[in-house]
Amino acid sequence: MIVDKTYGLWILLRETALPLGILALWDLVVVILYQVFHQEWMEQPALPISLMGSALALFLGVRNNAAYARWWEGRSLWGLITNNSRSFAREAATLLGGRPDLAKAMAAYPYLLRTALSNTEQGPDAKRLLSPEMYERIMARTNKPNALLYEIGLCVAEEVERKKIDGAVHGTIDRILSDLANAQGGLERIKNTPLPVQYSVLPLLVVHVFCIVLPFSAVQTLGWITPLGSSLVGFLFQALDKSGRDLQEPFVPSRHALPMLTMARTIEIDLLQPIGEAVGGPIPPQGGVQP
């Protein structure tokens, strides 16, 4: 996730530089054909293009709102993961009488969840936090974050049985695990349900068509400065479309994705510091981007 606004503007300009350059080159071709070779057929009325631009702006606004809603829901569900992980570690210490291994296991959960959502290779974080036996059992499962919650639930049940803890206490901790499973289910729903093709592909095609026909309605008015005016308007629509496409997949590794590694590291620090484990600091931004 981009956290430096200045760097973010530079990233946006760099990512749209190629289509902007192609658009400016096309505008120049249109101007030369009209001004030098007097291609009268290029004189097109401005009203249809203006109406098309207005409709396209509304369409992009609706799509971008839908994309941001997916991104923000993902961030909200990660907030629930953070809060419930902290609650579990606290109740494991106060109600179960310790069990630092459970706090470490819960600290490994967001790392497993991150790799499952982003379809990336499993890093060393979960392995260093889990016991070798538990890690081996979890790696043999398809849904590794859910497998870890299952293992933690079994450990809690064994501790309750061993210490003859009241069932109400067990129910309190089990509800936290259920809330974590519900949040994970919401994140998996976002990952497994892409934005409809009408929102993900159609805006890109319409923006390109609009940018192609735009100079035809501007050349008779702007003349030789058509590449400047047309390219600026085209860049605005390109930037709007790019913003929506960046947000519609919040877990795909990119500069615009949710900072899942940072959130996982924050959870680890919050869970292990109270039990006296030596942990480092949070992950700092790297080049204006929070990983």
Image: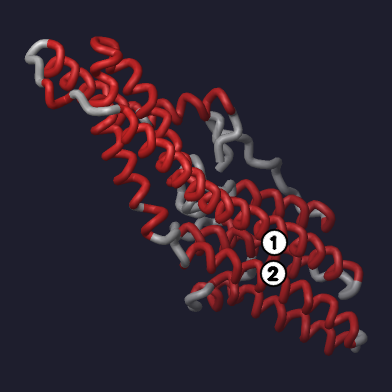
Which residue occupies the foreground of this view, 261 or 34? 34
280 lies above or below 289? below
Residue furthest left as drawn = 37
Tell me if residue 210 can be seen.
Answer: yes
Q: Position of residue 124 (x, y in %)?
A: 54, 56
Identify the amino acid type marked 2.
Leu
Quarter occupied by the N terminus: top right
Q: Position of residue 196 (x, y in %)?
A: 41, 61
Mark carried by residue 180: 2
Tell me if residue 22 can be seen.
Answer: no
Q: Residues within 10 Å of mark 1 (few under 14, many from 20)?
A: many
- Classify residue 32 as left or right of residue 240: left
Look at 25% across and 12% down and name the residue there. Answer: 223
121 lies above or below 149? above
- Classify residue 109 as left or right of residue 118: right
Q: Position of residue 152 (x, y in %)?
A: 70, 76
Which residue occupies the foreground of this view, 197 or 102? 197
Q: Are marks 1 and 2 in contact (CB under 8 Å)?
A: yes
Quarter occupied by the C terminus: top right
Q: Quadrant of residue 97?
A: bottom right
* Sequence order check, earlier mark of 1 and 2: 1
Identify the amino acid type marked 1.
Ile
Instruction: Check disc 1 and report its element: helix, strand or loop.
Output: helix
How far apart marks 1 and 2 lie (CA) works out to 6 Å
For disc 1, the marked residue is 81
